[in-house]
C-alpha cells in the first residue's frame, strides 16, 4: 500500500532532493516532500497520527551520507573564519562535567583560533542560528516553515569525543535531531507528570536522580534521526571514540490552542462588552460580601450559587462573540514575523523583482520599464509569503520577503490595502498555486489592476509565469 | 406593608440622620439607612428593582431644608479661603454659551478673589472632590461606599442664574443629583441606542440636534433629588431668577459583569493552560490555510467547522477553570484602593488606636502599654475596612484606614498574614458586627492571638467594645 | 560700641520677638533681627566674620525659657495625633547601641500609640520636616531663608534619657542646634582633613576610633545654642537623668562658589562656541598621538606644551564669556523652588489677595471688584517672594507664594512677562521695601499698569499699603 | 623644491596606490600617502596650512581615470542587487525642482527595479554609507581616519543629466568632493557671517536669494577634486549632457577645541571642588540681592565687582585643575567608537588571529596551539587600533577591531588591564611601528608576558612579524 505522495522520495541525497524540489511548483507540496524525506522511510501521515506531540521516533538508516550537505563541521569552521559570529549571541561554549553544567563564553567575536581551543579542551559548541550563516539550512527551514505553520528553527551542536555538553532537561519545542557526523549516545525519558506534558516553557537543568529511567537508550550515527515531543527529557553524550555533530530542527513553540485562546478571549470579551448590554450591567450591590477568597467556604449561601451561575452563563455566551478569524490573524502575524524570508531559486529570481532586468549599463539606466501588463500571469511567490489581515478599519497585507535571516532583526513589513483591492488580493491568494493574469484581478479599472500588481511585484510578493526579459 | 428597615427613617434632617447613624453599630446597616434617607420616601427595595440601571427617578419634596448641612456655597467659599484648591485639579471653571462648551481654568491656586470674579461673569464652578475638603461629604460617601461595593464619588456644581455650564452628554456612572440651593431646570433623554445603554465610557459633548426629545423636563428645587442611570443624556440650566448649587453623588463606574470578566478570563486561561493538556496541544499544522479573515468566506470547508467547534469546546471547558473568587478579590482590591478612609465618630475613635491614651505628659511618655488582652473584645472598625486576599502563595490583609481623602494619593496598604493567622482573620471578619474576645481567635497560642490583635489594632483596623482608658 | 542693628534685641522671649517682627516692615530686616535673636548675645557681624564656615560657637544662656514656644514634645505628640505623619517620610525611629546604628521604621502612619512605645524602649525620634506641621517653625524658617539666600531647613530630635540615637558623623550643612527641653551631651571634632573641610556631601557613620579627640565636650541645656560648620564631626547623647529635645536649623547645602560654577561653566562654553570662532576651530590632526593618558609621560614632546598652552588660552578666554548673572538666576530658581511659602501675618493677609473681601454672602457673590486702581500703593509682599529671570527669549517672574510647606511638593510657579512689563517689574522689585502707586509703574498705558498689578495681586505676590475693604 | 614625503606619489591609479600602500609598514604613513594622492599634485603640507578650515581648493586634472576603482555606478547597481539596501537608511531619493527640495523614499528595501525607475524620472540618489557595501571605500576611509584623528565618512551621489538633487546649504564637516563619473556644475559661496564660519551644525536648505554670489563657479569632471570647509554654502547641478557620480569624503564633525572643552570643563570643576576648599566655600549671604539679571543694571554696586572678580579668580584657578589628558581620552573614545574596523591585507591577515592556522580538518581540530612565544615579535596591527585609557580606578584598553562597518552597530569593545600590565601596554603602543619580542614586554614573569600577548592576539589587536604557520 503506497503512501500518499511519498513513494517517489527514495533514499535520495539532500542535494538531489533540493534540486528536485525546485521543480515542484507549489511551495506547500515542496514543504511536505522535504519533510517526508527527512523522516523517510516513516510515512508523514502516520508520523503525525502516531508520534507528533505523543512519543519519540527513532530512525536508524545505516546510511552515513543521507543528510550530507545540510551542515558540516568544515562549514562551521568556514563560518567562524568569514562571518561575524559573536560568543553568546550566535555561539555558546558549554560543558557538563561531574553533574555541573557551565557556560564559558568570552565576550566578542568567536574566531577559529579561540573556538577550537575551547573544543580541544573538551567544551561543546552550540551554534544558535545556523540559518543566518548557512544557505542550505536557511533553504530547508524556510521550506519547512510552510508545512508547520509555525516557526522552524535550528541549533547545531558539536561535541568532542568522550564528553557531554548539556545537563538532562526538556524543551518547549518539537525536536528533530539530525545526526550529521560521528555519533552520540542519547537517553530519552518520559515527561515526569501530566503537568509537564507538552509544556509551555523549557525546564531547568535536572540532576540524574530527578528524571527516572530512560524509555530510549540509543546511539545515533550519521544519517540517523531522532524525534521527540516537547516535555520529553533528554541527554546526549559522546562516546570515547568519536565526536558528534548534529542539527536540531525545531518547531511549535507556543503554538497551542491555549496560545490562540490568549488572542481570542480578550477580543471576545471586548466585543461582548461592546455589543451586549448583559455584559455592561452592574454587579450585585453586595457581591463582595459573599464572593472572594475570604467567603469561599460559604457554600451554603445561595447568593454564591446564583452569582456563579450567572457568571457561567456570561462565559458561555462569550463564546458566541469570539472573533476567531481575527484572532487567528493576530497569531498568524506573529508567525509571519518569525518566518525566514523565502530563499529563491534561480527561476523564482528570474521571474520576480529580484531578477528584473533594470540595471545600470554603459552610463545609463536600462530596462527601466514597468513589467506588469494586463496579460502578464502572476501568482504569490510562495503560498505563505503574504497574508491579508484586517484589524477593525484598515486592511493590511503582511509579507515575509523583507524579513531577515536573523530572528526579528527587521519589523514585519506590510502595505495598507485599499478597500477596492481587497477582493483582488483574496482572489490572488486563493488562486495559488495557479498563475492568473493581471487582467483577471477583480478590480474596477485596468489601471487599478496594474497598479496593484506593480506594488506586489516591487515588494517581491508575486512573480510572473515567465522569466523577465531585458528589451 | 412596611418596608424592610426603612419605616423608621422619616423626613429627618441630615444632622439628625447622621447623629442617629452613630448609634447604629453595623456599618452595613448605617449605609442602607443613609441611602434610604437620601431617596426617601421611595423605598430602597423597589428603587433597586425598578429604577437602578433602568430609568430616571425624580423626587420632589417641597422641603428646601431636607439636604441642608450636606454642602453649601458658604462652605465652598470657606474652602477656597482656607484650603489649597487648585484650578484644574480641584476646581473647573466652565461655560456653555450659544452651543459652545469652554473651560476657563487659569493655572495655580483658586482663591475667592478670582473664583467669584469668574462666577459673576457667568461661569459655572465644578468642585471635583468636595470629600477632600468637607467632612460631611466625606462622612456621607464613606458610609455609602459600603452599600454600593463600588467607589462613591461626588462633584459639586454652582451655576449663576440664567446660565448653563455644560453641554448635553451622558456619563459612565449612576448619578444622584441632590439639589442643595436655588433651582435648576433639567432635561433628561433616553440613551440613543442599545449600544449606548449602560455605557462603559462617558460621551463627548452633544449638540442639541443629536439627542432627540427629553423624557423628563423638570425644575429641581432645594431638597429635591433626581436619579438617572449611566447612558442617560442630560443637561441642566439655571432660570433667570435663581442660582443653583447641587452635588452629584455617583457610583458604579466600571463595576459591571464584564469588568469582572476582565479579571476572570485571563486567570481562567492561565489556569486551564497549566492544568489541562488539551489547552497545550498544538494547533493543526494547516490551520492558517483555512482560518483567518482571508479565509472567512470558505464556509464549505469542513476543516473550519471542526476547528471552530474544537475552539468552542475549549472555551466552554474554560468556564470550569475560572477562579471566580480570586478574580473577585482582584476587583475588590481596586475598590479598596478607591475607598475613602472611614470617618470615625467619637466612640470609634475612643475605642481604637486613634484614641489610645498613650501620650506625652509632664516630660515623659505615659500610658504606653499594649491595649490587647485575652479578654479584650474586638471587631473590625467597619465591615468593609479590610479584606483577606490570597494571590498564589502569600495571603495579605488589605485595609483602607490609611487611604487618603484625595483619590489614590496613597498606595493601598496591606500586611502579610502568616498561614497560622488566616483562620483567625476569617473568624474575625465573619464575626462582624459582633465583638469577639481576643482569646476566642483560633490561633495556637495566646501570644499569637494577642500579637495578631495588636497588629490589627495598630493599623486602626479593629476597635474594642469599650473605650480605651488611661491608667 | 553698639552693634549694627542688634542692640535693641535683648533676651526677649520668642513670642515677643515674633510679635515685634510683625512691626518690622522690611522682610530682610526681619530676617537679620530674628537671626540676631537666635545667636544673642553674640553679634551677627562677628559671628559671620569669625565662626560661619570656620569653627563651632557655643552659647550657654542659663535661661531655659529662651527658645520656648519654638517647638515642644507636647506639640510633637499633638502632631502625631492630628496629622498624617508617616514613618520613613516624616519620622525616623533610630538607635545607636554598642556602636551599632539602626533604623526601626515600620511602614505606614506614625500614631502616638506606636511612637511612644518605641521611645519607651529607648529609641530616638527624628521628625524630618517640622515646618510642615508646626506654624511657628514654618514662620521662623520662612523668615530666615531670606537672610541665608539658601534653603533654611530643620529637623527635630527627641532622645530618651541615657541613650544615643546617632553615630558620629558630619553633615553637608551649616548647623544650629537649638536645645528646647532637657539636656544633651555633645562632642564636636575637627574635620579630619582639608578634603573633608566644608564638604559637599555628608559622611557615613564613623566608628569612635576614626574621629580623634573632640575639640568641644559640653552639655547643652534648654535655652543653649551650638553652631558648627559642615564637615565638623559630632555626636550627642543623653545623660541618665534627662531626656533631650532639640531642633537643628540648617542652611547652605550645596550653596558654594563651585555650585554656582556648575551653572556658569556650561553656559560660558556654549556662549563662547557660539560667538567665538576660535572655539570652533578644529583640533590638530595628530593630537591623539601626543595627548591622552597613554602619552602623559612624553614631557619632552613640544607639541604637548603647545597644545596645553593653547587650551590654557581658551580656558582663560572662556572667563570673558561667562554669563554670571544668568547663571546666578539658574541658582536662584533652585533656591526659590526650595523656599517655604511666606507665612503671612494678619496685616499682610488683610492687604493681599488672601484677605480680599470677595466672598459668598446671602446667596450671592459680593465685593467682586478688582482691587487695583491707579492710586493704589503696592509692593512685593516679601523681598524674596519673586524674581525676574530671563532665559534667552522669554522673561518669567518666578514666585514662592504657591510653594508648599512640604519640600518640592509643588513645581515652582511662574508667569511669563511681556517685554513691555519688564521695566515695571524691575522698578517694583527694586522699590522694595517702599510702596509705590500703580500709576508710577513704567508701562505705556494706565490699563497696562492696572492689568500687571492685578496679575501680581491675584498670585499673592504684592500687597497694598492699606487693608482691603469690603464695600 | 621636492615636497616632504610626497614626491614619490605621482599620477598613479588608485589600484597602484593601494597596492603600494600595502608595502608601507606604518599605518600612519599609509594614511598620509593616501591623502597626498587624493589631493595630488597639491602638497599636503601647504594644503593644511592654506586651505584646511579656511577656503575651497579646486583641483582639475584632465585625467578621467584618476579616481577609477574607488566607486562606480556599476558597483552601485551591484550593491542594490546583492545587498540589503534600505530606503531611508542606506539610500535617499531626492529632488530639487523649482526651488523645492523633496525626499521620495518609499519604505523597505531598495531594489534596482524601483531605484532606476526613480532615477529615470529625474531623482537623485544618495547612498549614505557606501563603506558598508564597498570594500574599497571601506579600505580608503579606514586608512584616512588615522590621519584625521576623527571619523572619516562618505556619501555617494548619483544625479541624472539636467537635474539638481539638493538645495543650497552648508554642512558641519570638511568636505572632499571626488568626481567619479560624468560632470557636475558646482557653485560655492562664502559663509554668510563669522557666526556661520566653521559651524557646529549644518544649515537648513537656503533659497537662492539668501546666499549671495558664488566665490567659485566650476564644472567638475571625472578625476577632479573640490574641497571646501564646513560653513561654505554649496550647490551642484548636472548639465543637460551628462549624469554625475561623485563621492564626498568627510571628516572633522564636532572635532573642535570647544568640543574638547566640553569634556575638560566639567572634569576640571569636579576636580577643583574635590581638591580645593576655595571652591567649596559658601556664596555671600546676600549675593541674590545684587547679582542676577534683575540686578544687572546695578553697575555702581561695588559688591557686584567684588563678586565678579572673585568668580574670575576661581575660573582662572580652574584652569590649573583641568585634567586635559583624561578629557582627550574621553574624546578619543568617541573617535574609536566612530572608527571603521581596519581592513586587513593578506599579510596582515596571515600574521594575525584572522589568519591563524587553527582549523577543522579531517574530523578534528588542528593547529590548536597558542601562537605567542617569548621570541615572537609583535606590534599593534595599526597605529590607531587601540588606546589605553584610565578613568579613575581601572585602566582599559579600547580597540576597534570588532567595530562594525555600519556606524555604531556595535558597542566599542574594551578589555580591563591589570595594573601590572599597564607599562607593558604603553611600551607596546609607543614601540609602533617597530616589532618587539614578547619577552621584552616589561612584565614581572614570562607567563604574564605571554598571557598579555595572547589576549591582545585573540582580539586581533596585535600581529606578528612573521606569518603564522601550520605545524
Image (cartoon, coloured by chain):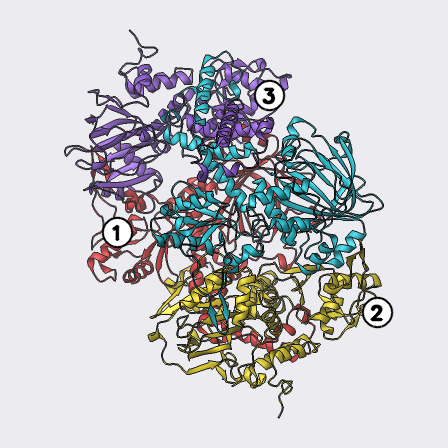
Chain colours: A red, B yellow, C cyan, D purple
Q: Check the image and report above or below for D241 versus C110.
A: above
- Measured from the top left, where is residue D362 in percent x and y? 52, 30
Q: Secondary structure at mark 3?
A: helix
In the picture provided, is D218 more to the left or to the right than B266?
left
In the picture provided, is A88 more to the left or to the right than D76?
right
Tell which residue pokes out farthest to the top in this image.
D1
Q: Which mark is residue D421?
A: 3
**To which chain does the residue with label 1 belong?**
A
Quarter of the image where one finds residue B210 = bottom left
- Measured from the top left, where is residue B195 in percent x and y? 42, 74
Structural crowding at the residue carrying mark 2, measured as other residues with C-alpha within 10 Å and reported as few (<14), some (14–19) or many (≥20) = few
Visible in this render: residue A32?
A: no
Residue tagged 1 = A454
Q: Are marks 1 and 3 in contact (CB under 8 Å)?
A: no
Visible in this render: residue D98?
A: yes
Q: Check the image and report above or below for C18 versus D242.
A: below
Marks counted in the figure total 3
Structural crowding at the residue carrying mark 3, measured as other residues with C-alpha within 10 Å and reported as few (<14), some (14–19) or many (≥20) = some
In the picture provided, is C158 more to the left or to the right than B323?
right
State the separation of the CA atoms marked 1 and 3: 63 Å
User: For the point 32% across and 61% down, which residue is it?
Assistant: A426
User: For the point 39% across and 45% down, which residue is it?
Assistant: C422
State the separation of the CA atoms marked 2 and 3: 76 Å
Q: Nearer the viewer, mark 2 or mark 3?
A: 2
A104 or C185: nearer the viewer: C185
Q: Secondary structure at mark 2?
A: loop
Q: Check the image and report above or below for A209 versus C201.
A: below
State the separation of the CA atoms marked 1 and 2: 88 Å
Q: Which mark is residue B375?
A: 2
Q: Are marks 2 and 3 in contact (CB under 8 Å)?
A: no
Amino acid at each position: 500500500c503506497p503512501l500518499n505522495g511519498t513513494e517517489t522520495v527514495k533514499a535520495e541525497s539532500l542535494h538531489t532532493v533540493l534540486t528536485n524540489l525546485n521543480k515542484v511548483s507549489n511551495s506547500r507540496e515542496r514543504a511536505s516532500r522535504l519533510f517526508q524525506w527527512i523522516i523517510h522511510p516513516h510515512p508523514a501521515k502516520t508520523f503525525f497520527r502516531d508520534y507528533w506531540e505523543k512519543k519519540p521516533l527513532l530512525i536508524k538508516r545505516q546510511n552515513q551520507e543521507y543528510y550530507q550537505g545540510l551542515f558540516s563541521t568544515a562549514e562551521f569552521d568556514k563560518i567562524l573564519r568569514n562571518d561575524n559570529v559573536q560568543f553568546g549571541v550566535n555561539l555558546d561554549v558549554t560543558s557538563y562535567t561531574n553533574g555541573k553544567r557551565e557556560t564559558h563564553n568570552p565576550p566578542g567575536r568567536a574566531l577559529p583560533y579561540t573556538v577550537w581551543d575551547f573544543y580541544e579542551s573538551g567544551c561543546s559548541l552550540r551554534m544558535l542560528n545556523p540559518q543566518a550563516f548557512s544557505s542550505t539550512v536557511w533553504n530547508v527551514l524556510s521550506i519547512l516553515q510552510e508545512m508547520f505553520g509555525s516557526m522552524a528553527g535550528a541549533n547545531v551542536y558539536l561535541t568532542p569525543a568522550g564528553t557531554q555538553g548539556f545537563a538532562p532537561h526538556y524543551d518547549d519545542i518539537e525536536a528533530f535531531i539530525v545526526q550529521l557526523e560521528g555519533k552520540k549516545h542519547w537517553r530519552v525519558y518520559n515527561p515526569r507528570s501530566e503537568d509537564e506534558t507538552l509544556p509551555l516553557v523549557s525546564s531547568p537543568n535536572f540532576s540524574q536522580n530527578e528524571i527516572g529511567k530512560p524509555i530510549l537508550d540509543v546511539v545515533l550515527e550519521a544519517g540517523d534521526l531522532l524525534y521527540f515531543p516537547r516535555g520529553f527529557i533528554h541527554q546526549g553524550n559522546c562516546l570515547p571514540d568519536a565526536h558528534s555533530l548534529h542539527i536540531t530542527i525545531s518547531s511549535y513553540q507556543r503554538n497551542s490552542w491555549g496560545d490562540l485562546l490568549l488572542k481570542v478571549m480578550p477580543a471576545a470579551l471586548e466585543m461582548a462588552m461592546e455589543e451586549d448590554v448583559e455584559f455592561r450591567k452592574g454587579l450585585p450591590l453586595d457581591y463582595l460580601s459573599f464572593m472572594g477568597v475570604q467567603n469561599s467556604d460559604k457554600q451554603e449561601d445561595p447568593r454564591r450559587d446564583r452569582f456563579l451561575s450567572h457568571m457561567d452563563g456570561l462565559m458561555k455566551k462569550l463564546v458566541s462573540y469570539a472573533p476567531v478569524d481575527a484572532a487567528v490573524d493576530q497569531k498568524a502575524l506573529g508567525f509571519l514575523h518569525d518566518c525566514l524570508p523565502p530563499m529563491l531559486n534561480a527561476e523564482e529570481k528570474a521571474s520576480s523583482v529580484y531578477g528584473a532586468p533594470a540595471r545600470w549599463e554603459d552610463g545609463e539606466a536600462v530596462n527601466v520599464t514597468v513589467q506588469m501588463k494586463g496579460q502578464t500571469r502572476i501568482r504569490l511567490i510562495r503560498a505563505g509569503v503574504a497574508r491579508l489581515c484586517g484589524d477593525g478599519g484598515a486592511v493590511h497585507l503582511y509579507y515575509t520577503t523583507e524579513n531577515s535571516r536573523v530572528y526579528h532583526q527587521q519589523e514585519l513589513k506590510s502595505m495598507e490595502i485599499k478597500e477596492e483591492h481587497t477582493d483582488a488580493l483574496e482572489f490572488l491568494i486563493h488562486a495559488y498555486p495557479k498563475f492568473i493574469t493581471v487582467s483577471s484581478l477583480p478590480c474596477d479599472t485596468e489601471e487599478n489592476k496594474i497598479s496593484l500588481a506593480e506594488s506586489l511585484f516591487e515588494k517581491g510578493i508575486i512573480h510572473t509565469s515567465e522569466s523577465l526579459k531585458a528589451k
